[in-house]
Image (tube, helix red, strand yellow):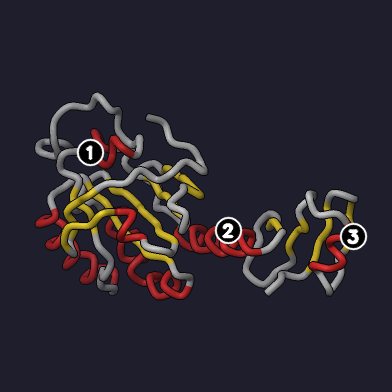
Amino acid sequence: MSLRINDEAPNFTANTTQGTINFHDWIGNGWAILFSHPKDFTPVCTTELGYMAKLEPEFTKRNTKIIGLSIDPVDNHAKWVNDIEETQGYKVNYPMIGDTDLAIAKLYNMLPAEEAGTSEGRTAATNATVRSVFIIGPDKKIKLMLTYPMTTGRNFDEILRVLDSMQLTAKYKVATPVNWKNGEDVIIVPSVSDEEAKGLFKAGWKALKPYLRLTKQPG
């Protein structure tokens, strides 16, 4: 099954470092980020998990939960967490899923549905495509999907930036321009007429073109 933006995020029940969860119930009424790893005790992923531990308070401010996934048993995750804290300086307090039967990786189209076997005997190379990030909204729909190669560490500052943009644009009739950062000017969406915009954007706007109107970030 292929997944697209605005598809419902497939639900699942899984064992994690914080007990068994039902994914949709765990998300609750907020946002969630699911980010996956091909195997425990891999160098790039170690740095990523540590950085997400550092950023977790920022995601919490944004009513967003984070959860990791790796194709290894939960018992291994618990040992890996010690390495992460030792080398990266931050303790992982968010849950990490053990996907030993590859079920969630297949459910999220990170491995082929017909892939045989379990985590036993598999290497990071055979799980290379399990390097994805999914942002899921309160409506349980997928808002973003990114997949990285194993040799390139993910930019989670960018994930935070995108989350800011999506939460803003879900609330107001705006879009964010290239390289936008929180607090910068935004674009009034083309579906809003100039007449409607007068009521919505009291600060006014600068029209570079009729379809490209810049205004101060609302809220």
Kind of residue sitting beneath label 3: Glu
In depth, the one of 27 and 122 nearer the eye is: 27
Q: In 3D space, how far apart are the residues under numbered discs 1 and 2 (Cα atoms)?
A: 29 Å
Kind of residue sitting beneath label 1: Ala
- Quadrant of the image for the N terminus? top left
Q: Secondary structure at mark 1?
A: helix
Give the residue number, with chain letter if any, for mark 1: 103
Give the residue number, with chain letter if any, for mark 2: 166
**Can the viewer see residue 181?**
yes
Which residue is at a point 51% across and 49% down the rendered structure image?
143
- Disc on the earlier residue, 2 or 3: 2
In depth, the one of 42 and 164 nearer the eye is: 164
Give the residue number, with chain letter if any, for mark 3: 195
59 versus 113 height, above or below: below
- Where is residue 150? Give x, y as percent: 34, 43
82 versus 119 height, above or below: below
Kind of residue sitting beneath label 2: Met
Which residue is at a point 71% across and 71% down the rendered structure image?
218
